[in-house]
Image: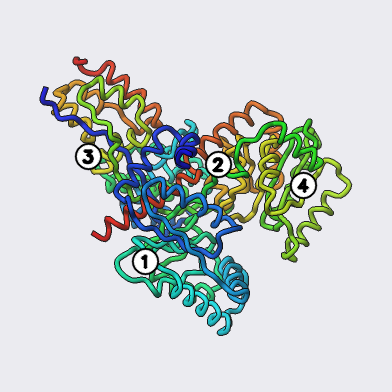
Amino acid sequence: MGRLLDQYGEEMLPGRTERLERLAAPLAGLRLLHVNSTKVGGGVAEMLQRLMPLFEDLGLRPRWEIVEGTPAFFDVTKSFHNALQGKNLVLTAAMRETYLAVARANAARLDLSADAVVIHDPQPAPFVEKREGPAPWIWRCHIDLSRPDREFWEFLRSFVVRYDAAIFSLPQFARRMAIPQFLVWPSIDPLSDKNLPMAPEEVEATLRRLGVPADRPIVLQVSRFDRFKDPVGVVKAFRLVRRRTDAVLVLAGGGADDDPEGAAVLAEVRSAAEGDPDIHVLLLPPTAHREINALQRAATVVVQKSTREGFGLTVTEAMWKGKPVVGGLTGGIATQIVHGLNGFLVSSVEGAAFRIQTLLENPDLARQMGEEGREHVRRNFLITRSVRDYLVLLTWLKERRR
Amino acid sequence: MGRKPYPLMTLAEIREILHRRAAGEQDLLDGIEEIDGASIYYHTHSYYLRGKYRHDRYPNDFATWVADQVRDRVLSERLSMVDPSTFADVEGLRAGLITIIEQHLDTIGFSPRALFGEPFEFVRAHIVVLPTGVEVGSRAELKAALASAPPETLFYHFFEDAFGRGRRTGSLVEWVAEDLGDAPLAAALAAVNPYCLHLEQLRTRILRALDEGGGRT
């Protein structure tokens, strides 16, 4: 078995593996501790599963610990997650106590000795109370703090300001604080089930299983059924397109069982699509990585017509598969789509329709934009770039201490 | 020959969020006046490092934001023609940008805003410079190395090690003049303006200078 790093090397630009090795060389043997709330499920855990062996391949000594919590603790941290992203909730004294008791018990239980510590998201944030020695502590925030509930943020902030640095996914997600804050875009894993190359036969078989015709152009949006993703707007845009151009629309998204608003949006989408055999609304389980992969590969045009968006990794995934993307001019979509180069940025239903139609009617343009998108992702949004960002930040923190 | 070999370098950067944003052209002007010089450098240079862009994209973040988010074609066109190589340093470049935006705002009499767009976010980069492990000792070796060097190596030697350190040309050109003793080639390399081009075009120009510039081979 070769190094995992070498498998990624085949996806990177020439010379990138060597650059990572040179960057990592002065950090050889560095004990790098990551702490988050789970080893399975969710984007952070998926990312850490891959980052650990990559750091090892580069000569660091990574370690990954998790917060062991009670159901009550995770209920509280779910409230944190929602309130920090803008939901209006009340932070009670009991919630603070539950949160702090579990976080402090974990901090006491775990071995936090390391040469650098990266704490992910709010769950283990109070661990910083236990920091000892000169090792830098970094808080990696994966969520959007642009409009947090003030009470929740002020409470969390009292811990975050004790870190040496924080990392955010976009500048607009960050909060003003006295510690340096760094921009690290999220990234995708080209070797995961969601992104691995797939045989055309598997793509076709998957389409058949999902009831999507393989012999007509496919317009695809993959996203939760959430109003900010504007799935009804996508249906309206598709209807405008189909007046002149043949295509089918696929809206594929995660389950809405535990999300009343999601269920309402799904009902609206189904109602908007009712009676139209060319619109396919697919409710897929969170584990349907290969199905998503197949749909993205089968698509002619991928849409992400959000009106508010985090980073929008579905855009990255589609670009990696060589697809042109029509995306709403918001959040990380505007960072990824270079308008007119690898896709189009739009601000209305009509704009989306116009650009989708342009791409459906111009296969050469669509192919060329898809190729540009794949190269854009290769340069900027693969997991190895996240590794590089960590290495540069660790180097910067090390030099600053001198 | 006694020539000192020259080590080719590469770099990697991480961006720092500065919590300064602009929602309109007056805000952009205020930000450019007050922000750290490293941010001015980042927003006028990182375009080259970010890869191959089409010719119809503007070569600095200020012009691109004004075009895409404020949708003021006149100002974006004026900002697109700011050539850092015509300024002695980043403070001169800052002054040049300020003059253009001030004149534009004076002319139109109001400050256009990104009404339907995203605000401009000022950032700056911290750069780690690394050896590539490649050392060159002759013109032929330099040419062979630059022909296959990663884009970051070109960026380091022709931007970061030059304007990034407040000088016209980088240490590579000095090495060609002093250690390689090839003043005509050094002059030919110094005459290449990297700001007109993207990095692959810059590579072509440099290789052409290495083929044609000066008298030695």
Of the image marks 1 and 4, the number of the one nearer the N terminus: 1
Q: Are marks 4 and 2 in contact (CB under 8 Å)?
A: no
> Quadrant of the rendered structure where residue B152 is?
top left
Disc nearest the viewer among 2 and 3: 2
- Pick whichever of labels 4 and 2 is earlier in the sequence: 2
Q: Are marks 1 and 4 on the same chain?
A: yes
CA–CA distance between discs 3 and 4?
Answer: 56 Å
Q: Amino acid at mark 3?
A: Arg
Q: Quadrant of the C terminus of chain A?
A: bottom left
Q: Residue at x 41, y 45 (%)?
A: A57
Instruction: For residue A154, say whether it is visible.
Output: no
x then y, percent, for residue A47: 52, 52
Read off the residue under disc 2.
Answer: A190
Of discs 1 and 4, which sits in the foreground? 1
Q: Quadrant of residue A40?
A: bottom right
Mark 4–mark 2 Cα distance, whole angstroms, equals 33 Å
Looking at the picture, which amino acid does disc 4 mark? Lys
Between the C-alphas of marks 3 and 1, the distance is 44 Å
Q: CA distance from mark 2 to mark 3?
A: 41 Å
Looking at the picture, which amino acid does disc 1 mark?
Ser
Residue to which mark 1 is pinned: A113
Q: Which residue is mark 4?
A: A236
